[in-house]
Amino acid sequence: MYDIRVNGFENRLFVAIKGTIEQPEAIQGYNKITKAVNTLVPGFTLITDIRELEPATADVRLIFLNTMQLYLNSEMAIEVRIINPNNPTAAQVFQRISRSIGYEAQEVFTVSEAERLIDKFMDA
């Protein structure tokens, strides 16, 4: 399940991905994320919540890679990922994917930590 929200005032995208994601749902999620990113301006910030994401198949991981490439191509300023410290598999996969295309997301455990980190980054 994807939960995608845009905060135009803060130029921020929030994406939560939960459960087991199959290819058709991943494609729909990518398409929705593309529309959301197109409403933001370069320098937008991103919070990705993958605390409840189950391991994904190779075809779904490729869609995740394409999504991260979209963020880079759209000039994202920073991504903060909310991860589950008791189940690091999704976090490891996502970090491996983002590193393969040239960036590393900051990792935290709660939404409030993510928001504080982004606010601190934007004030710097």
Image (cartoon, rainbow, N blue to C red):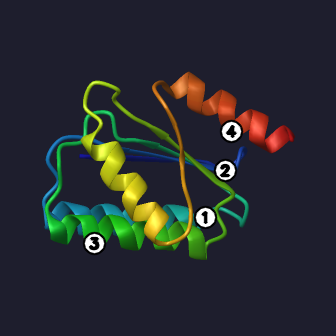
Q: Earlier in the sequence, mark 3 or mark 4?
A: 3
Quadrant for residue 109, please give it: top left
Secondary structure state at the residue bearing disc 1: loop
Q: Nearer the viewer, residue 97 or 62?
A: 97
Secondary structure state at the residue bearing disc 2: loop
> Residue tagged by mark 1?
39
The residues bearing labels 2 and 3 have C-alpha atoms spaced at a distance of 28 Å
Instruction: Name the kind of residue labelled 1 in the image.
Output: Thr
Instruction: Name the kind of residue labelled 4 in the image.
Output: Ile
Instruction: Name the kind of residue labelled 3 in the image.
Output: Leu
Identity of the residue drawn at 46% across and 62% down: 98
Which of labels 4 and 2 is toward the front?
4
The residues bearing labels 3 and 4 have C-alpha atoms spaced at a distance of 27 Å
> Residue tagged by mark 3?
62
Quadrant containing the C terminus in the rendered view? top right
Identity of the residue drawn at 64% across and 52% down: 78
- In-image side of 57 versus 103 (left or right): left
Q: Callout 2: few (<14), some (14-19), or many (20+) C-alpha neighbours within 10 Å?
A: few
Residue 118, disc: 4
Q: Position of residue 17 (x, y in %)?
A: 31, 45
Residue 8, disc: 2
